[in-house]
Image (spheres, grey):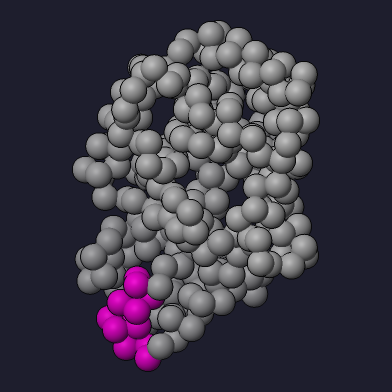
Amino acid sequence: MAGRQNRNQDLDPFTSPRTFFGSELRRAREAAGLSQDQLGERVFCSGTYIGQFESATRRPQPDLSKLLDDVLDTGEHFQRLCELARKSKHADYFADAAELETRAKTISEYAPMLVPGLLQTEAYARALSSAAQRFESREVVEALVQARLERQAILADSTAPLLWIVLHEAVLRVRVGGAQAMAEQLMHLVEMVGTNRRVLIQVLPFDAGADAFLNGTTIHMTFTDAPAVTYVESAYTGQLIEEPAVVAQYQRAYDLARAASLSPEASLSLIESAAKDFATQ
């Protein structure tokens, strides 16, 4: 713990709102004579979790910031800093999950209707964002597209997570952006698997019947130095789940979906076939 706290002291608090939040948290905690573990007990989390905020590796959370203000008697100081530190290019409900993607050791995603953001082509992402934000300006749509494409940089990194995707067969049939855009998108999936050995895709076929995830996207992430988390999403909303028992339940359901899916080889053949169908339209 001492080593972790020493590293926190080396942070420049003026690098970003998040590092300032972490620096202020460490200052207030030490002024109160509390260790990270002791403060964690008072705000119902672990000392490791407190350390992640102090080291600016996790985005501050509104509910926790209020508890910190209450316990450390700091008025609304941390709540105001939290609001600044949580600004993101992504929708607020997804921002925490987007950040965790950059630290994940493995990412396991189930996609019931749409190609996951980490594997979308620009044309597919633009068509999808334009449809979802029908009443927003083109500038807003383009900002969303660029933010989505920037997320994909983690796949080219030397420490890229292992990305295991289960696509429902519906993903291959829902036309997003027209036939040409769909053909390009599906062939992009095939090419990604062929060129990146840390990307694996399976297709859950229509005849597999019902599964636990039909009603929404589910992303399960594991980490080297932190507990696993699950992110679930539907239209315009999402939730990051950290309760171990619930995360484990999602993991079991994901394993069942993976077991019911086609083999990776058969999945790629089906994706290629769907791409050719769109290419000839």
Image-quadrant location for residue 197: top right
* Left or right for 42, reference 216: left
* Left or right for 22, reference 11: left
The answer to if 274 sits in the magenta stretch is no
The magenta region covers 63-75
At horizontal 38% and vertical 36% (from top left) the residue drawn is: 214
Main secondary structure found in the magenta portion: helix
Image-quadrant location for residue 114: top right
At horizontal 26% and vertical 50% (from top left) the residue drawn is: 243
Q: Which is nearer the eye, 13 or 4?
A: 13
Above or below, 4 against 228 in this view is: below
Q: Which is nearer the eye, 227 or 153?
A: 153
Quick one: quadrant of the C terminus? top right
At horizontal 25% and vertical 37% (from top left) the residue drawn is: 249
Residue 158: % across, % down: 66, 31
At horizontal 37% and vertical 63% (from top left) the residue drawn is: 50
Residue 168: % across, % down: 47, 27
Above or below, 149 against 27 in this view is: above
Quick one: quadrant of the N terminus? bottom left
